[in-house]
Image: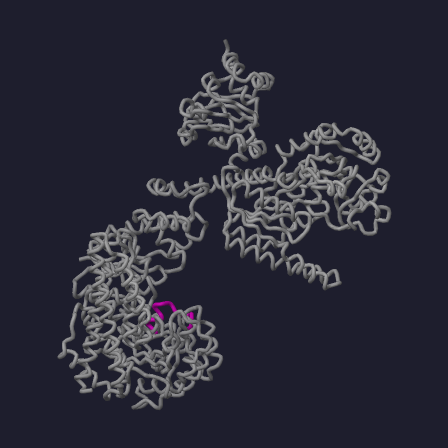
Amino acid sequence: MRVLVINLMRLGDIVQSIPTLYGLRDELKAEVHLLVSDIFKDICQYIEPVSKVHIFENSKILRYLFQDPYSYVLAYKEVKGFINYLKSFRFDLVINLTPARFSALITYLLDPKRYLGASITKDGYLFVNGSWMKALFAAASFRKEIPFNVVDMFIRGSGLNKRYKYRLSLKDEIREKGRALLSSFGVRCDDRLLGFQVGASRDDRIWPAFKFAKLCDILSSYGFRILLFGAKGEIPIGDKICELARAKPVNLVGKTSLGELLAILERCELLVSNDTGTMHIASALGKKVIEICVGPAYYISTGPYGQGHLAVSPDIPCSPCDYFIECKDQICKEVISVDDISNLCLYLLGESHRYGKISSNVKVKVSGFAPDGMLYFFPQNRSKMDESEFFSLLFRYVFCRFLDGGRDIDQMRLSRWWKDMERYYDGFSLSFYRIQQEIKSFNNLFFLFEEASLILSKIEEAYKKRAYLRDLCKNLVEINGMLKDFYKESTYARSVAKLFLINESSLEGEDIKRLIEENRYIYSNFSHLVAMMREALTKSLEIYHY
Amino acid sequence: MTLYASNMEILRKKNEQLAKMIDEAKPLPTERALSGDPIPKINGANLISVYDPKREGEIISSPFKGSKKLVIYGFGFGYHIEPLLGKVKKIVVVEPNLSLIKSALLSRDLKELLRNVDIVTDIDPKDYLSFSLFVHSSSARLNRSHYVKSCGMLKAFLKRFRVVVVYPIYGGSLPIARYCKMALKNLGNEVFPLDFSQFFKAFKKIHDFFDDREKRFRVSLHFKNIFSEMVVHFVEKVRPDICLFLAQAPINTNCLKKIKEMGTKTLYWFVEDFRVMEYFKEIAPFVDIFFTIQDEEFFEELKKIGAKRFYYLPLAAFPRVHRKINLKEPDLKRYGADISFVGAGYYNRRRFFPYLLDLGLKIWGSDWEGAKFLEKAVQNGGRRVSTSESVKIFNATKINLNLHSSTYHNGVNPFGDFVNPRTFEISACCAFQLVDYRKKLPELFKIGDEIFIYRDLKELRELIFYFLERDELREEVSQKARQRVLKEHTYELRMAEMLSFVLFELGTQRKDEIKRFLDTASFDKELLDFLNPYISDKPPTLESLCSAFESKKERFDSKKAIFFLLSTIKRGFI
């Protein structure tokens, strides 16, 4: 079986797809091909399960596109040639892990026998194949409601369901290069190394340079050599840290090749990082990571994969913020203090048995695998499960079952789910009244979906007879209006309503009959989901005798 | 009978006058194409294919085989006309070069062609609006100026543009801007005026607030920059094909560049004397086409400063405004006179007019303050005269004086070249005028028949005495002048000529673009066929191609998918 995996996003996404690639090779016994953008091709040589890497020459195409107003035909030639080249491999399956229209167009152009993820229909509209892939698409807008790590979503979306190896493979020659570079900076073989990834793809994800400088001073005093990592564009941050820090760190910002970075990271005992590709590389090298989540960084979705990493985030209502918000007062950067991070570092490095005092408005979560086999971030210290945590876990349980095709709640499994959670939580801190309210809201939502589903079946019937359509459509529009107004009703049920509206509005096409059918399918699917949610809530209350 | 004689026999039967003119013309040298067919040689250049002119004629004429009535610009050697015989009901061929026709008649058997087509040397485009137009490109390039004024104008009449017209804040070019707007609209274009005269009061108040000349200049500059940004914003909103600026319209070079980047063609009509107003140097090199009311010396100047495309376009009249009117008694009494002058008190007029006071001269217009001897002649307290008032004055006056302004001369400027709008306006009103001699005047009016001129005071006084006594002659001359204006000198015709030139110049540029585009896409025959319907007068850009796909809602296929993919890449989604 020959499989092509399309991953045209960032470096981090490619690293996060490693377990999927192992799964495809080891479980499906597939010959795995990987399609990446030219700027990220270097990482592919360290990904072992890939038989062949195909490079999408994005930079060359961009050059053609901007050369003059008509040179796009040369870009056309380039793409057409590339697609024909890819088609010659006759892939049995194309897995599109990039939730975007352009990758959907590539999937369409490849005209594969079978595909998972986004493609384009014959009439030119986007279509996502596979329930987990649909969730991956929706997760970009509903990170909090779809509480799964991207790595797990890649695995499930590709039709796999286990945990697979998460490892980048380094050769000795690369290690040698890393050693040579370090020694040129006066780093000895027996130095204990700590890495700081000081930049990020967006300014709002960067913890301040002066805090990194102070952290450097504290940790250096324990005898660690601090290495600063970053891309060429982040050189000013590295320079600023060096200028502010009394203990001089080894400034490698903009000075390492990808191979050298990998080799040096492998030598580090720990990486303190903003939400970056370097963080994923470190975790794929088996290194412990402390992720500082500021701005829109959200550890549940994109935190470091593997056991025992720490995610530090501000415990403030706006965190994590939306991708499109331009924050003028990034309080999240102030909230996480240098002491918080240094205490956690020393704890992970074994310099202290427990970590010291953490600021009251800072959350520290540790990564681990939940009973469903997927990554989750649990509280570092057992504490009472609050309402948001409760709903996050409840959503997780229901969604997982729903996306796997389940249409009801198994009381035994649900009990086990909560029982397992007792390892991490010291009981609940919930308001019975609030839960009852949410159940009521889910109830209302259920009836709306059921009603809409009924109307749509009538519309389907009426469409055949060409009658009564106007009144029926009017009723449907009324229901949609109520769904839009659902935010007044509840905190958690509304997110399901929102998710529904996004799903519904993404329905594209001109074939009315097909649209009615698909619309009805979405309504009925969501009525199942809401029914499951309501049932899970009620049963959870029963389990804990509320 | 020789080839020539037999051809001429047919032509003589159809159009004797033309046959006579051709007979008198000197033939061009001819040579043989590779196919053996005769072809003309004009100044060393090839007008038609040197390989196989018949095949070329077949190809270029094929799109016109379905036409009912056709105007063909360019006779060539008849190769592109022959395939259309019997397929098109009526064919009119426009060819100004009689030598070319003669050499064709000498070397080819064209009897069939001559029997079935009408050959003319010129056309009035308005008479051919129901015809399709087939332009033999190399003939049009060879006779550029003739083409622009004949068939090019027909093309301009038939094509619809979106045009933004940018008005000045004030000044003599303001009414011209309004006429241009109306004329463009009458031609069927979509016109969007941007009238800066609405800010005149604010501009004047702020301007007058400063008494220092340098500060006033700085303030004017600020205004210019603000208004320029307004133009850019307006063009962004309207997305016109053309943005036409009238002289004094506020625009800076930076904003001109921005407008050009948006794909809008920038035209500037500089209705000023380049010897007095030098600001053209900041504009002419940055616009697509610069139109002038002077040529020769001015063109030399324009070449020096790096202007690429410029075109002589004289002023005109707007007959709906400048018309003959029957005045009522009170108006006749108020505006009537033997001799009147309408205009501002320029230096040469102040020096010249005192010698006409004995003839009862009435002066209308502003800026006559301090003209001691003329105080009594200046009407209405020297206030500005509105357009409708000036039309009444022209109509009510026996002899309208027209003296082009000058800031140095004591009377007539002996070197004056361009013709002012008043010349056309008085004529359009069917009023009589005596105008000072201008170099460009004989091209526009028949001197001594449609219009009478003077070169000095003596000549003027003699003409005044002569014509004052001859009412019928004045009427006859005025009628002729009016007919000439209606036929050749209206703003509609000027705008059509302007658009004709735009189509010709930028059309040639676009043809080069299309050729380059087709060459680039030639690696894939299937792609060429696919793109062909999307090539109109210019090749499609990636953006226009994708929006055409979206609007047409045709079957989705892999070619469209690739173009959509490229569009997403270009917008930075990867």
- Is-magenta flag for residue B217? no
Report the front residue among A275 and B212: B212
Q: How is the image coloured?
A: one colour
In the image: residue A300, left or right of residue A527: right
Report the front residue among B422 and A359: B422
Please state the horizontal and vertical placement of residue B17, each as a whole percent of the image: 58, 18
Q: Given the current orientation, which residue lies at the most extreme left position?
A: A412
Residue segment shown in magenta: A252-264
The quarter of the image holding the C terminus of chain B is: bottom left
Q: Is residue B10 above or below residue A188?
A: above
Residue pictured at 46% horizontal, 32% vertical: B132
Please state the horizontal and vertical placement of residue A130, each as a whole percent of the image: 22, 63
Please state the horizontal and vertical placement of residue B47, each as a whole percent of the image: 51, 28
Q: On the image, which quarter does residue A6 sit in?
A: bottom left
Q: Given the current orientation, which residue lies at the most extreme front position?
A: B329
Residue pictured at 58% horizontal, 55% vertical: B254
Residue pictured at 24% horizontal, 71% vertical: A152
- Would residue A398 be visible to someone looking at this image? yes
Q: On the image, which quarter does residue B484 sit in?
A: top right
In the image: residue A129, left or right of residue A341: left
Q: Is residue B183 above or below residue A367?
A: above
Q: Is residue B411 above or below residue A106?
A: above
Report the front residue among A272 and A446: A446
Please state the horizontal and vertical placement of residue B50, each as a whole percent of the image: 47, 27
In the image: residue A232, left or right of residue B289: left
Report the front residue among A514 and A268: A514
